[in-house]
Image: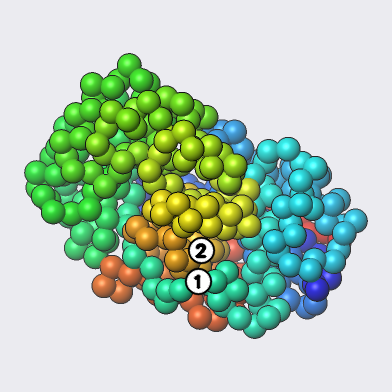
Amino acid sequence: MIKLERMSLFLVELPLVSPFATSFGEERVKHALLVALTGDGVMGWGECVAGSGPWFSSETVETARYVISEHIRPILSAHKLIEHPSDMPKLLSPIRGHQMAKAAVEAATWDLYARTQKRPLFQILGGVREEIPAGVSVGIQPDIPTLLATVENFLHDGYQRIKLKIKPGWDLAPVGAVRERFPDILLSVDANAAYRLEDFPTLKELDRYGLLMLEQPLAFDDLLEHARLSQTLSTPICLDESVDSAHRAWEALELGACRIINVKQGRVGGVTEALAIHNLALARKVPLWCGGMLETGIGRALNVHLATLPGFTLPHDISATRRYFREDISEPPFDLQNGYIPVPKKPGLGVEINWDRLLRSCTWSRTWKL
Ligand code: OSB
Ligand code: MG
């Protein structure tokens, strides 16, 4: 039982080492909202994965700041005692939607709980790995030579799987060029919902490149068209945006809308919901992997712990710190060892805030007594 005492929010802006372009836009600076919960003299951290604008999902750092400050905080104030982090979804269930806001607060309770128990989070989650296979997500590049050089560098770093961001006009040519140059690598593509069923001929062409998967080709809220597409492609479809809850994951699998699921705890409303998806997928032998949202070290640490669960069997979008930031707000940085990221063994997330860097990159913060 943890008695919550205080909550702090921090808005931070961290420059990315290189711009990250997807079918929905380009990011040069990572905007993150961090949540710190204090209880029993211990501090637990969570990161909200909402972006600077409503492009990946309807949430943004600003909607999350509002929902956490004005709607989640009063719930925590009225109910300060937390028995277990998995009680959070029920506590927050009066709030509709806002998965990323809820997930950030739940994440802070997981870190706090594990730190109170003096155990690394992966042990509490039931993780079975001490290192996790790292993949890398490669944004849309200015041209094909730049793309090939970028992929080559990441392969040289040891990444076990390359994921290319695609969109109409940046698909068959770049994918074909990468496949021709690197015939044997694990290669996948992510469209971030940029195609429509009318684009079927282009999507069908992708079948020629031996891709590990095609991630979220169609609309962000669609299952049925993905199910139709899935029947006619040999490349497995993986859903990201369309799966925003465990119930939705179940619907997707029942419909045959995907054969693989990208799990992002933030997108589905928290670690507890992600665990439900994990258990469902494990029972059905559906492969999972852990996606990323260009998180700072706080959010990345949570992804690393989650990815130690037995159902996570494919390389993840969890890359080394230096692939994202020159200086992160937490320590130590994540590094690759032979294509794997070692799982932190210290209590909780196993990373510590670098206060100096946090305060330097912080554009707004507030602390409340609960
Ligand atoms: O669709 O997986 C995605 C980043 C921001 C928003 C959406 C996505 C991504 C990535 C990057 O692909 C994954 C990472 O954090 O390395
Ligand atoms: Mg994706």
For residue 189, above or below residue 118? above
- At which x and y percent is residue 241? 49, 38
Density class for disc 1 (Cα within 10 Å; few <14, some 14-19, many ≥20) is: some
Residue in the image at 75% along x and 60% along y: 87
Left or right: 104 as drawn, with respect to 298:
right
Residue in the image at 26% along x and 47% along y: 212
Mark found first going from the N terminus, 1 or 2: 1
Q: Nearer the viewer, residue 27 or 248?
A: 248
Residue 234 visible in the shown view: yes
Q: Amino acid at mark 1?
A: Gly
Q: Which residue is mark 2?
A: 306
Q: Residue furthest right?
A: 78
Q: Nearer the viewer, residue 124 or 113?
A: 124
In terms of image quadrants, where is residue 154?
Answer: bottom left
Work out which quarter of the rendered image holds the C terminus and state it.
Answer: bottom right
Left or right: 138 as drawn, with respect to 207:
right
CB at mark 1 closer than 8 A to ligand 1? no
Q: Nearer the viewer, residue 349 or 219?
A: 219
Q: Are marks 1 and 2 in contact (CB under 8 Å)?
A: yes
Residue in the image at 69% along x and 49% along y: 102
Q: Amino acid at mark 2?
A: Leu
Which secondary structure, mark 1?
loop
